[in-house]
Image: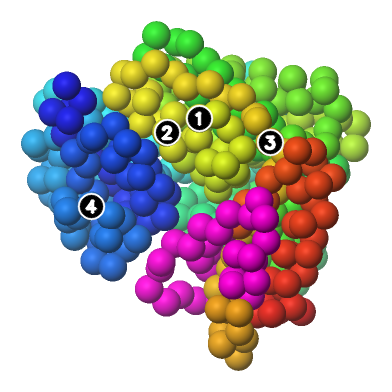
Amino acid sequence: MLEQLKTGILGGGQLGAMLLKYAIDFGLNVSVMDKDPNAPCSRHTSSFITGDPMNYDDVMKFGSNLDIITIEKEAVNTRALRQLQANGVKVYPSPETIEIIQNKYHQKQFLIKNNLPVAAGSLVNGRKDIELHTNKFPACLKKCSQGYDGKGVMILKTTEDIANAFDEPCVLEELIDIKHEISVIVSRNESGAIECYDPVLMVFNKERMILDFQICPANIDMDVAMQACNLAIKIAEALELVGIMAVEMFADSKGKLFVNELAPRPHNSGHHTIEANTTSQFEQQMRLIMGLPMGSTKLNKACVMINILEPAAYRKSTIAAALKTILCTDDVHLHWYGKQGGTEGRKMGHVTIVGSNIEQALSKAVMIRHLLKGEYAEN
């Protein structure tokens, strides 16, 4: 029976908390480990363990009595996961896949090896290395590791920018004439069956380099949407993925696609699937790692998803009023993560707006986004 399978999640953030909601539907016994004792997951399971997912001993102790382990972030100890896998624990995604994703240069090399389109990039080990590549400016500099939610990414326009550049291993990447930023959530089971969710159009906060809002279905040509899904399928097959993965891409002004980044876990760009699709990305992940039948990825409603970021200190007092107004609006769904405090710009929740068509969803989204910006975000 399902409830006899002991499952573990490394990482206790909001993605893990949303996974837990669907684990409960399946009657699963799920343990979670995070180094923050007040992480969002701590309130949703009686089996919350305080420990560091990057620490070998902590991961080994956590996983030693489990049947299945999955992740909600890539910052985990893969050496321990390899050993647990050798001991008979099922690990999804595989430690090998996680290792590829953990380093952006290795990720790019994997994509190139599999003949997948990426922006040209070079490995640089610090500022002195960057000085040798000024002929490539303007360019995008990405930390090889420990980059997330816009952290670890910056644009270098002139040689004067090098003084403030990351002084560690990075990828210096050619800038693309970006027309659209797209994400596709792809799901694959152990037998190799694959299904894609509809591509979403992503709009980023250019100051913080973090997802601001997204639209689904994406307002892109049908052939671009099909190409995006085909690329996601090729990557899932090359990785022999079991579970779900977000594939972020750029589309240039000519409609050519470039793979940007991969995330083999639930992802911010798939949050809309909770309200808009037959099977959410979170339910799909639980189905696939448990060996259950894959759920339908059908999009049932048009939708817009808006991230809610931690406001500047002087605007915090008005957030409650803004959220109450949002909750009074039909077909609007608030997800508040319950994080304990946070720095300005940190993701604190999201709002999903659904409608019978994209115009209907967008009309409400414009009002809500204006409310959020006007009530407590920066002007």
Q: Report the residue that reaches farthest toward the bottom.
A: 314
Q: Secondary structure at mark 3?
A: loop
Which secondary structure lies at badge 1? loop
Residue 141 in the image: x percent, y percent?
A: 65, 55
Q: Residue under circle 2?
A: 283
Circle 3 crowding by C-alpha within 10 Å: few under 14, some 14–19, many from 20: many
Residue 179 image position (x, y, % from top left): 85, 42
Expressed as whole percent of the image width and height from the top left, the position of residue 217 reads 74, 35
Dots 3 and 4: beta carbons under 8 Å? no
- Disc 4 from disc 1: Cα separation: 23 Å
Say whether residue 146 is magenta. no
Which numbered disc flags the more N-terminal residue, 4 or 1?
4
Q: Are marks 3 and 2 in contact (CB under 8 Å)?
A: no
Report the disc number at residue 279. Answer: 1
Q: Are marks 1 and 2 in contact (CB under 8 Å)?
A: yes
Which residue lies under the disc numbered 4? 45
Which stretch appears magenta? 322-350
Disc 3 from disc 1: Cα separation: 12 Å
Question: At x 50% / y 35%, what residue is drawn?
Answer: 280
Residue at image location 69% in from the left, 32% down from the top: 199
Q: Earlier in the sequence, mark 3 or mark 4?
A: 4
Look at mark 3 in the image and give the residue it sits on: 301
Q: Earlier in the sequence, mark 3 or mark 1?
A: 1
Q: Residues within 10 Å of mark 4 (few under 14, many from 20)?
A: some
Relative placement, left or right, of 71 versus 362 is: left
Q: Are marks 4 and 1 in contact (CB under 8 Å)?
A: no
